[in-house]
């Protein structure tokens, strides 16, 4: 049983905006410290940042317009990172937070639903969410030709409440609210999106997930803020593994589109 949402779902729009701001931070500094929270919906977008980078308002607002569409009333609140947390990273990468992490191999059912979600989003490019539970497939796709979807997926339950427009004018979105979609059976105590690579919520989650896919076995890890070693590896090495993965996808915004399960 698995649920997947596409990149146009309001929660994923919030994740993508947060990811775009992290990308801006990495353009400004080699290894910035940044955490971003985004709340979007019903004509408004609120953004709070804690960062070593001072963002240009226009750069942030342009990213919001590009991802969510024009016409939103936006508010950006910028803050510097706590001095004690910043000091933890002054002489190199150390674990940036306490955390628990469980990477789990992706199942065929989860891969199948992700493929279905991607194919539908490629066609319509609008808000959608999908469930696969054995033989039961539920497709909720906004702005869609329902007859066409019924032809493509004749056994599916399609838009049980009928046609809908979707997007942030129908529902609100918030950063890291769709971790089940992003991680499948993997588990974290934090969130994947809107954070730099020094944060364990990003780097250790990616590391645990990739190791689980490689070994075919669940991977359970924990860490405390300031740790220099996790799973027998230097924390700096785990950061570089995560950096390579994010780079392979095209950046933090691209990572936020589908999360770890893609």
Image (spheres, grey):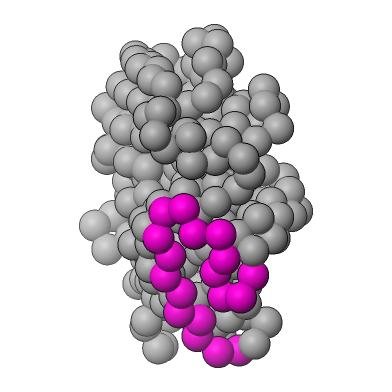
Residue displayed at 42% across by 37% down: 85
Magenta extent? 216-233
Is 121 in front, or is 204? Answer: 204
Query: Residue 230, position in %: x, y?
Result: 55, 69
* Quarter of the C terminus within the rendering: bottom right
Residue displayed at 57% across by 36% down: 90
- Answer with the quarter of the image where residue 232 lies: bottom right
Residue displayed at 60% across by 48% down: 93
Q: Is residue 45 left or right of residue 216?
A: left
Query: Residue 255, position in %: x, y?
Result: 59, 50
Q: Vertical placement of 147 versus 62: above or below?
A: below
Residue displayed at 37% across by 29% down: 82
Is 253 in front, or is 73? Answer: 253
Q: Is residue 256 left or right of residue 14?
A: right
Q: Vertical placement of 223 versus 73: above or below?
A: below
Q: Is residue 208 left or right of residue 73?
A: right
Q: Is residue 232 magenta-colored?
A: yes
Q: Is residue 191 magenta-colored?
A: no
The answer to whether residue 138 of the structure is visible from this angle is yes
């Amino acid at each position: 049983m698995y649920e997947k949402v596409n990149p146009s779902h309001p929660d994923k729009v919030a994740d993508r905006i947060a990811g775009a701001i992290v990308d801006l931070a990495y353009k400004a500094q080699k290894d910035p410290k940044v955490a971003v929270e985004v709340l979007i919906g019903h004509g408004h977008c609120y953004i709070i940042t804690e960062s070593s980078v001072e963002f240009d308002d226009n750069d942030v607002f342009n990213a919001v317009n590009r991802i969510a569409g024009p016409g939103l009333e936006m508010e950006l609140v910028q803050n510097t990172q706590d001095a004690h947390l910043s000091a933890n990273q002054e002489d190199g990468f150390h674990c940036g937070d306490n955390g628990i992490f469980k990477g789990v191999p992706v199942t065929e059912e989860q891969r199948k639903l992700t493929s279905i979600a991607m194919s539908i989003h490629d066609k319509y490019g609008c808000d959608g969410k999908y469930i696969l539970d054995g033989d039961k497939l539920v497709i909720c796709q906004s702005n869609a030709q329902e007859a066409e979807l019924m032809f493509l997926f004749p056994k599916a339950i399609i838009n049980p409440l009928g046609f809908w427009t979707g997007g942030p004018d129908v529902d609100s979105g918030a950063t890291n609210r769709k971790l089940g979609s992003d991680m499948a059976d993997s588990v974290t105590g934090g969130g994947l999106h809107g954070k730099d690579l020094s944060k364990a919520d990003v780097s250790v989650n990616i590391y645990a997930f990739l190791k689980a896919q490689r070994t075919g076995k669940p991977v359970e890890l924990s860490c405390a803020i300031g740790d220099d070693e996790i799973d027998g590896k230097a924390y700096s090495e785990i950061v570089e593994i995560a950096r390579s993965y994010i780079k392979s996808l095209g950046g933090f915004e691209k990572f936020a589109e589908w999360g770890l399960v893609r």
